[in-house]
Amino acid sequence: MIPETLKNDAIALALHTHEPEAITGGHNDHNEPTLFIARDRIVPVCSFLKTSQEFNRLSGITAVDWTPADPRFEVVYLLHSLQRNQRIRLKCWVSEADLEIESMTGVWRSANWYEREIFDMFGIGFRNHPDLRRILLPADWEGHPLRKDYPVHGHKYSYQNE
Amino acid sequence: MQELLAHTDTIDIVPSQEDTRRHRMTLNMGPQHPSTHGVLRIVLELDGENIVSATPDIGYLHTGIEKECEVKTWSQVVTLTDRVDYLSNLANNLVYALAVEKLIGDIEIPPKAQWMRVMMAEFSRLNSHLVWLGTHAIDIGAMTVFFYCFREREDILRIFEMFSGQRMMTSYIRPGGLALEPPRGWQQAVGKFINNFPSKVDEYDELLENNPIWLDRTKGVGMVPLEDLLDLGVTGPLIRAAGLKWDIRKSEPYSSYEKFDFEIPVHTENDVYARYRIRLEEMRQSTRIIKQALEGMPDGPFVADSPKIVLPEREKMKTQMEALIYHFKIITEGYRVPAGEAYQVIESPRGEIGYYIVSNGTSRPYRVFMRTPSFGNLQALPDLLEGRLIADSIAALGSLDFVLGDVDR
């Protein structure tokens, strides 16, 4: 289902013809095309955009925590095409009950660290990721700091009695 | 001999009897290593002098800036963006301001503020490239260049201080315009610098161009094919040194860059030397841009006419009730930004820097994701090092030009 504002967008149309079930919504706010993609179709959609729509760069991947909404997390893929000089944003919803999404490392190698960062900061798992470890925090860290229920201030340990 | 070794802790790294000829050593480069310019740890697996594998270990400088953004008001976040990358803080200020202005929508930045932003961003590029050139040369053994570069950098920091009152954490570019009116006599200060600087760039060029050690250590080192660089998310001078003419200032112009006349330097050698040539040429181009900004600086206000976002003038606060109320509201509660999301990208000295900002309509950002160029570029490090000599690692590492604060955030 192509959103009303992207009816004339060549990329959205091409994607819709190739993967009719994948697009679940989207918008074109601030002239930045954004498409919601079904979670299990994200890798085929991205490889289609890379191979036949010239989206040769993955600018970055990030996530947003929309607690208490369900599904809770939004994984955001920021794609860029050098030939077309265009950017597009893809989004997938990941629920807390099934905190996993397919890894994008097979399409772009740069996804590696971004996915590790999301794993570290939000606790979202990536299936078939070659090296899914924490990246910024120590390996024995508890919790995922960029979740909204993680406190901003305060220490778990008291350093005064040591 | 074996019995003796069994009692030592080093047993792991001592070769076993049958494997004495093909022994691999694991070496920790960093976290405190002078050539990493920060706290980066690289675990190198060595076969003699050859690097078999290189694994970067980051996070030593992680300060949770993205998390902290979520509890600060929109105007307070500006000070955090300074601290992401201490060498190009004005580029970070600029991309944040542009992203927030995109979300606000109905705000028009006056031409003077836009040109001033361009000028300051180019100064920030000069600042960053000068520190890079100085430290990269000192890594490779050319000591003098360091002092020359820092001499000019000092002039730039003085200009920053003149404009914003701060040498490094300027917070000069803010949503809605600039922080302060450009100071009296700024034209003279900038003009003096711009007149002298091109000859200084020639000086660095001369110092290094005829230095056989520099040439031997940089030419043909650290080459990675362009496709791999793109696949790994590398941006900026590294991509241009690999032959791709891509600069966001030209391809997606922001802040009236389209009105300036400058070239994008491109090389095809794709080695450390080409990256040095690119950055040197970029310094010359930045000088050109600053010169145009100085000569054609438009008149007019330096902030947008939107009293709900921009702090009022000090004088007006003492005479006008509305100004006092707006000031009170902005400082205590902060201004609200319409719900939505925006991804703004600019060309920083290190490459593509993008801020993905999500607002839920309150006076604090809901999420700020910083796509920093250093993080993207550092991912290419294993490709740059593996299969090459350990002696080349310093030159290859330096050519990436990363700032660890920018990597870890």
Image (cartoon, rainbow, N blue to C red):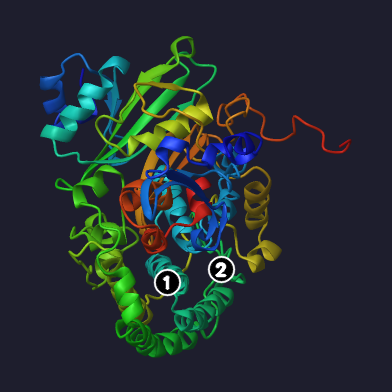
Q: Nearer the viewer, mark 2 or mark 1?
A: 1
Left or right side of B14 for A26: left
Q: Chain of mark 2?
A: B
Image quadrant in which you'd find residue B59:
top right
Q: Residue at the location (89% across, 35% down)?
A: A161
Work out whether mark 2 precedes mark 1 in sequence or the reverse, and give the earlier one.
Answer: 1
Q: Residue B370, how many percent across, how many down?
A: 45, 45
Q: Secondary structure at mark 1?
A: helix
Left or right side of A77 for B336: right
Name the outermost residue toward the top: A97
Q: Chain of mark 1?
A: B
Q: Are marks 2 and 1 in contact (CB under 8 Å)?
A: no
Q: Nearer the viewer, residue B381 or A143?
A: B381
Q: Secondary structure at mark 2?
A: loop
Q: Amino acid at mark 2?
A: Leu
Q: Amino acid at mark 1?
A: Ile
Q: Residue at the location (22% across, 17% down)?
A: A22
Q: Residues within 10 Å of mark 2 (few under 14, many from 20)?
A: some
Q: Residues within 10 Å of mark 1 (few under 14, many from 20)?
A: some
Number of dots carrying numbers? 2
Quadrant containing the N terminus of chain A is top left
Q: Residue A127, how many percent across, how many down?
A: 36, 19
Disc number placed over residue B180 in the picture, else none: 2
Which residue matches tag 1? B140
Up-down: is B286 above or below B342? below
Q: Are marks 2 and 1 on the same chain?
A: yes
Query: Is residue A156 shown to the viewer in this render?
Result: yes
Query: Is residue A3 shown to the viewer in this render?
Result: no
Q: Nearer the viewer, residue B27 or B154?
A: B27
